[in-house]
Amino acid sequence: MLIARILRDVNIDAYRDSQLGNFVTGQQYINAPAGCLIVRSVEVVDGSSPAERTYLQKRDITFINEYNKFAEGGTTTATGRGLPKYYAMYGGSP
């Protein structure tokens, strides 16, 4: 897709948009906004006082799977989880 590559490589403010969402304990995915072609970054705002802003590092989905396997000892329970460090595009993303 040539248009996706142009939008990813050329930083045009006219096509920028942002999406606000909330993390839910135990939920693995957050949907991208309708019509989203390129995700440039994911920022997490910790709601504790004072609010702390952190950008997540983009990784491949296989990295996320391996990271979760070793970080949580292979379990999928919600105990011991904190703020995320990484994100990956899953599905039909360019």
Image: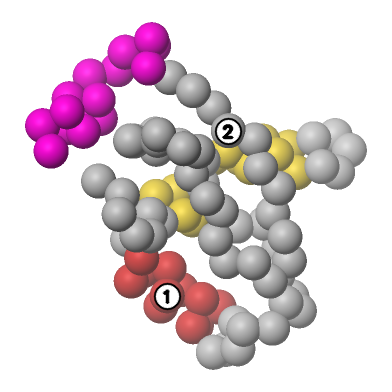
Identify the amino acid type marked 1: Asn
Packing grade of label 2 (10 A; few <14, some 14-19, many >=20) is few
Q: Secondary structure at mark 1?
A: helix
| Residue 66 in the image, given as x and y percentages of width and height | 41, 78
Q: Secondary structure at mark 2?
A: loop
Identify the amino acid type marked 2: Gln
Task: Please name the residue shown 42% across and 75% down the image.
Answer: 65
Q: Does residue 40 lie above or below 76 as drawn?
A: above
Question: In the image, which is nearer the foreground, mark 2 or mark 1?
Answer: 2
For this view, does 91 lie left or right of residue 57? left
Determine the image quadrant of residue 89: bottom left
Task: Please name the residue shown 25% across and 25% down the image.
Answer: 7
What segment carries the magenta color?
1-15
| Residue 73 in the image, given as x and y percentages of width and height | 57, 89
Instruction: Name the image quarter holding the N terminus.
Output: top left
Determine the image quadrant of residue 43: top right
- Residue 41 lies in the magenta stretch: no
Task: Please name the residue shown 43% across and 68% down the image.
Answer: 64
Task: Please name the residue shown 64% across and 67% down the image.
Answer: 27
Q: Which mark is residue 19?
A: 2
Mark 2 or 1, nearer chain start: 2
